Image (cartoon, helix red, strand yellow):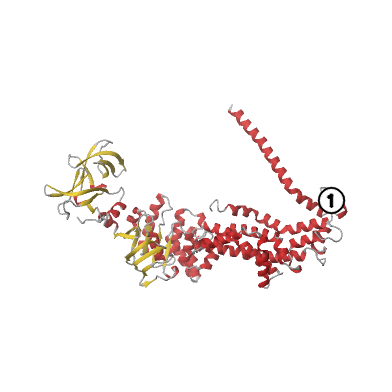
């Protein structure tokens, strides 16, 4: 149990700087997900917390202790790797007991801990087996078992589910979350999968090119993205974005984009002539039945069961609208789309920053 | 119709197979003839060989040539047989193989898992060692052995073979460990294992196939080496290859071909045994890089 603080940490490989001064405070017991596209520095950041990678400058504090120069084994952390990293020549039991054996813990105690971890993870029948005799999901559980027997202050997960098939991934996602709820150990979890991040995290940290783009709860980053990058990265199907210019129409602010007029809420703090990006998530772009709204031409209709995804051509731009109504639409049909005013996002074209609406 | 085609297919298959097997048997026989000649003539009395038929089976079976080659034949000054030289070879080859394999494994471990600035150059230089002909290093090596006081000793030969074999053993282990997941090393680090413990507990237990390959390679090369043996050893530290040469090419007295044959088989026996015992792993180890797992 410990809080983790990352203070102005940078990392360079030679002349190439990959982490640019990251500040991050993680409260005790939180499940924090580092999310970002590949190459954004999330794994590097995790490895620096683990002590597998030297930091170039800054400070990493775990449980009130600066750990910059501490060996990984002295940082009171445990890590789960993407490819499980199990010792192939050791049984499941020995895999889990290895760290305690190195610490010269009494055998009875280490046995007790392995059995405890095995019972939590449903691994008791497999303790005598070797990793090659286990399925992918079981191997991943062994890797987790190896982490929890140490009773560390912080769990570090480096894309632990990306080697599993889709169904198992969903199942393991739930298991990891349940494990966290049971142990309440501070957890830092790296992934590039936004669904994993959204479903598991207390706090999501979105990274890009070695910088933090936004920190917030799953719904906060979804509902109030701080910038264009976060808005585009989170959400599937992705947010609809249209570049345009603020204008006044009948005394109300609107955005003119490519010949169409997009409505804005009344009290938005923008000036006419301002260059903006207008963002609206697919589920907030409603097909209307009564002839109001912006005309668009249906290109593709994808029923997913719970809802229908409508891809339409809106003044030369492809947009997506999601509805739960059972609309009868075909390719080529005219559809009128109405953005929900209180869900409109506005971003500055030059900086990409959200303009608070 | 289909039935008929199928039968033709089977028949051609049989013919082709017969041809292939005949060819294979021919080549197998061809390569086994020298061994046959050696074995057959090593159990004949000398008179029988003198009659000129090398290929015939012995009329009178005797193990005397073997006994003679092992313990009584005149090699150098003393009638000692190959025995003391055989022991020299074992005393030389066991530590030389063990040390060069271990150092190769350590080198491979460092070059793949503890990368440092300039590691590529170090590896390149080690690799270069594989291409240096024996003859080039003879004189510098003799000088070096003299300087460290190991000239003419078995320990000196061990040193020479370790140094010379390091390039190969490093190459083998580096390539093997290159495919070894680095995450395992990281996991072991977090578990609290240090540099050497990771090597002993994690890496070496997973290195079975490549250890076998390296040991076979080093054992055959060192056991069969003649040049270093003849250049750097004294009378009492000569390996068996040199002694065999002295036995066969001694210019006094009668040429005892049967003893020579027996001696040659004796000198080749250890490498033969190593191949038979671990040849299976040898092929498996060589393929290990190609087919993962």
Residue B7 relative to residue B53: left or right: left
Position of residue A187 in the picture relative to residue B26 (left or right): left
Identify the residue shown where x is 33% and y is 60%.
A211
Residue B91 image-quadrant placement: bottom right
In the figure, B41 relative to B158: above or below? above
Q: Position of residue A317 (x, y in %)?
A: 26, 43
Residue A185: % across, % down: 37, 65
> Is A259 left or right of B113, judged from the image as shown?
left
Which residue occupies the foreground of this view, A251 or A134?
A251
Q: Where is residue B231 in the image (x, y as percent from the top left)?
A: 72, 64
Q: Nearer the viewer, residue B77 or A26?
A: B77
Q: Quadrant of residue A326?
A: top left
Quadrant of the drawing holding the N terminus of chain A? bottom left
* Residue with the mark numbered 1: B58
Estimate how packed mark 1 is, as few (under 14), some (14 to 19) or many (20 or more) residues with alpha carbons within 10 Å: some
Residue A314 image position (x, y, % from top left): 24, 42
A58 versus A261 height, above or below: below
Closer-to-camera residue (B234/A189)? B234
The front one of A325 and B106 is B106
| Quarter location, residue A3 | bottom left
Residue A185 visible in rendering: no
Q: Which residue is drawn at 31% across and 49% down?
A: A236
Local SS, label 1: loop
Judging from the image, mark 1 belongs to the subunit labelled: B
Whether residue A152 is visible, yes or no, is yes
């Amino acid at each position: 149990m410990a809080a983790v603080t990352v203070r102005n940490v940078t990392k360079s490989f030679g002349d190439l700087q990959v982490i640019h001064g990251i500040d991050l405070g993680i409260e005790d017991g939180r499940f924090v997900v580092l999310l970002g596209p590949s190459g954004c520095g999330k794994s590097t950041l995790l490895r620096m917390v683990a002590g597998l990678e030297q930091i170039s400058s800054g400070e990493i504090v775990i449980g009130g202790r600066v750990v910059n120069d501490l060996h990984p084994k002295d940082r009171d952390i445990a890590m789960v790797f993407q490819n499980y990293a199990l010792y192939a020549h050791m049984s499941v039991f020995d895999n889990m007991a290895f760290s305690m054996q190195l610490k010269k813990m009494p055998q009875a105690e280490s046995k007790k801990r392995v059995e405890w971890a095995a019972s939590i993870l449903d691994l008791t029948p497999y303790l005598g087996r070797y990793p090659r005799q286990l399925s992918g999901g079981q191997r991943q559980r062994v890797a987790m078992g190896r982490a929890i027997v140490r009773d560390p202050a912080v769990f570090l997960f480096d894309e632990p589910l990306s080697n599993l098939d889709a169904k198992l991934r969903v199942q393991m996602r739930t298991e990891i979350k349940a494990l966290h709820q049971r142990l309440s150990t501070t957890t830092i979890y790296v992934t590039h999968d936004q669904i994993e991040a959204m479903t598991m995290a207390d706090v999501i940290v979105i990274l890009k090119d070695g910088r933090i783009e936004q920190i917030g709860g799953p719904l906060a980053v979804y509902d109030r993205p701080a910038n264009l990058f976060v808005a585009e990265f989170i959400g599937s199907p992705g947010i609809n974005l249209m570049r345009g210019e603020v204008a006044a129409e009948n005394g109300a602010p609107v955005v003119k984009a490519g010949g169409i007029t997009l409505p804005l809420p009344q009290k938005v703090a923008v000036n006419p002539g301002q260059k903006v990006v207008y963002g609206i998530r697919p589920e907030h772009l409603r097909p209307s039945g009564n002839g109001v709204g912006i005309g668009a031409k249906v290109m593709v209709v994808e029923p997913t069961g719970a809802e229908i995804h409508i891809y339409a051509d809106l003044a030369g731009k492809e947009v997506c609208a999601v509805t739960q109504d059972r609309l009868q639409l075909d390719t080529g049909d005219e559809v009128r789309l109405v953005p929900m005013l209180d869900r409109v996002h506005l971003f500055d074209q030059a900086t990409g920053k959200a303009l608070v609406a | 119709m289909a039935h008929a085609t199928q039968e033709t297919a089977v028949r051609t298959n049989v013919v082709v197979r017969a041809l292939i097997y005949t060819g294979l048997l021919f080549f197998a026989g061809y390569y086994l003839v020298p061994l046959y000649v050696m074995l057959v003539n090593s159990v004949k009395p000398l008179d029988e060989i003198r009659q000129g038929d090398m290929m015939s089976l012995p009329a009178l079976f005797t193990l005397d040539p073997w006994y003679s080659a092992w313990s009584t034949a005149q090699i150098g000054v003393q009638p000692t047989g190959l025995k003391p030289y055989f022991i020299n070879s074992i005393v030389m080859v066991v530590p030389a193989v063990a040390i060069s394999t271990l150092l190769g494994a350590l080198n491979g471990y460092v070059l793949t898992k503890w990368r440092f600035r300039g590691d590529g150059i170090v590896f390149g230089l080690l690799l270069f060692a594989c291409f240096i002909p024996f003859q080039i290093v003879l004189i510098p090596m003799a000088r070096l052995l003299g300087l460290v006081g190991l000239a003419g000793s078995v320990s000196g030969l061990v040193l020479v073979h370790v140094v010379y074999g390091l390039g190969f053993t490093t190459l083998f282990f580096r390539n093997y460990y290159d495919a070894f997941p680095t995450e395992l090393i990281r996991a072991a680090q977090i578990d609290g294992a240090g540099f050497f413990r990771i090597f002993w507990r994690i890496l070496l237990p997973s290195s079975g196939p490549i250890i076998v390959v390296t040991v076979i390679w080093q054992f055959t090369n060192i056991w069969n080496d003649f040049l270093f043996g003849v250049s750097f050893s004294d009378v009492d530290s000569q390996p068996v290859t040199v002694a065999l040469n002295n036995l066969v090419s001694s210019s006094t007295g009668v040429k005892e071909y049967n003893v020579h044959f027996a001696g040659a088989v004796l000198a080749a026996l250890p490498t033969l045994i190593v191949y038979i015992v671990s040849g299976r792993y040898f092929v498996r180890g060589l393929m290990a890089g190609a087919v993962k797992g």
